[in-house]
């Protein structure tokens, strides 16, 4: 059965129109929550947790997100326990973004499940699509790394600062560079 709504098409990784009224309303909701999160006081831990719980699709225990933080929808982000997300993180979550337990995400990391057609005519018609991202457990992502659409990262991975991931990463490796490549096994 084919997805009917633009949201269903978006989550299925099919072409959809981001200008859809329902999707626009959901993005506005995420902008409101992230604005409130980004304006919290440094010591307002309970309010931050409340807002993160309202924003994300799921939220484990002992999760810390340092403002500023930005995302498209928020409710397509699923975060495990004992996760730290540093300043200036951006997650474009048009498809699911799953972050496993014990992950550390450095400052300025960008995670993009959103993408656009290569065909210029499809882009001018306002079509977009996405590919889900899965980040395993105990992953450390260095500052300013970029995770592109459709990437799966294994467990116990270290991603060097400034790396650009364009393909899946297996368990227990150090990767770095642009495009990122395996530097050594861990």
Image (cartoon, rainbow, N blue to C red):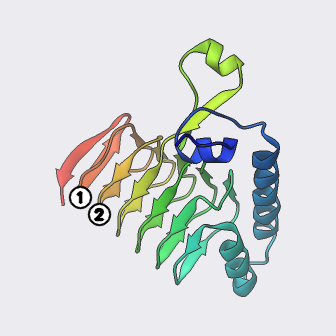
- Across and down, in percent, residue 51 comes to 73, 74
Q: In the rendered view, does 140 fall on the left or right side of 53?
A: left
Q: Is residue 136 above or below residue 9?
A: below
In the rendered structure, the answer to whether residue 18 lies left or right of residue 149 reads: right
Quadrant hosting residue 156: bottom left
Graded by Cα atoms within 10 Å as few (under 14), some (14 to 19) or many (20 or more), the crowding at tag 1 reads: some
Camera-side residue: 14 or 123? 14
Query: Which residue is pictured at 36% across the width and 63% down the height?
Result: 139
In this rendering, is residue 183 above or below 185? above
Q: Toward the viewer: 27 or 2?
A: 2
Q: Nearer the viewer, residue 133 or 19?
A: 19
Answer whether labels 1 and 2 touch (C-beta < 8 Å): yes
Q: Could you say which is closer to the camera, residue 121 or residue 161?
A: 121
Q: Residue at x 34, y 39 (%)?
A: 167
Q: Where in the figure is residue 53, as x and y percent of width and height?
A: 66, 76
Q: Position of residue 7 (x, y in %)?
A: 66, 47
- Residue drawn at (62%, 47%) of the image: 8
At horizontal 78% and vertical 65% (from top left) the residue drawn is: 33
Residue 101, relative to residue 88: is it above or below?
below
Sequence-first disc among 1 and 2 = 2
- Rendered location of residue 102, percent (x, y): 40, 74
Label 2 SS? loop
Examine the image and state in which quarter residue 150 appears: top left
Q: Which residue is mark 2?
A: 155
Look at mark 1 in the image and give the residue it sits on: 171
Label 1's element?
Answer: loop
- Quarter of the figure with the C terminus: bottom left
């Amino acid at each position: 059965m084919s997805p009917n709504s633009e949201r269903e098409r978006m989550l299925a990784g099919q072409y959809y129109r981001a200008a859809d009224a329902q999707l626009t309303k959901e993005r506005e909701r995420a902008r409101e929550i992230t604005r409130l999160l980004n304006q919290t006081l440094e010591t307002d831990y309970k309010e931050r947790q409340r807002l993160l719980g309202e924003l994300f699709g799921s939220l484990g225990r002992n999760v810390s997100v340092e403002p500023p933080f930005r995302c498209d929808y928020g409710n397509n982000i699923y975060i495990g326990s004992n996760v730290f997300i540093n300043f200036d993180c951006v997650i474009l979550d048009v498809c699911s973004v799953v972050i496993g337990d014990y992950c550390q995400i450095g400052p300025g990391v960008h995670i993009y499940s959103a993408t656009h057609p290569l065909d210029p005519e499809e882009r001018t018609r306002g079509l977009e699509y996405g590919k889900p991202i899965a980040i395993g457990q105990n992953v450390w992502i260095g500052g300013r790394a970029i995770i592109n659409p459709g990437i799966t990262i294994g467990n116990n991975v270290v991603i060097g600062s400034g790396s650009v991931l364009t393909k899946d990463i297996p368990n227990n490796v150090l990767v770095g560079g642009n495009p990122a490549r395996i530097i050594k096994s861990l």
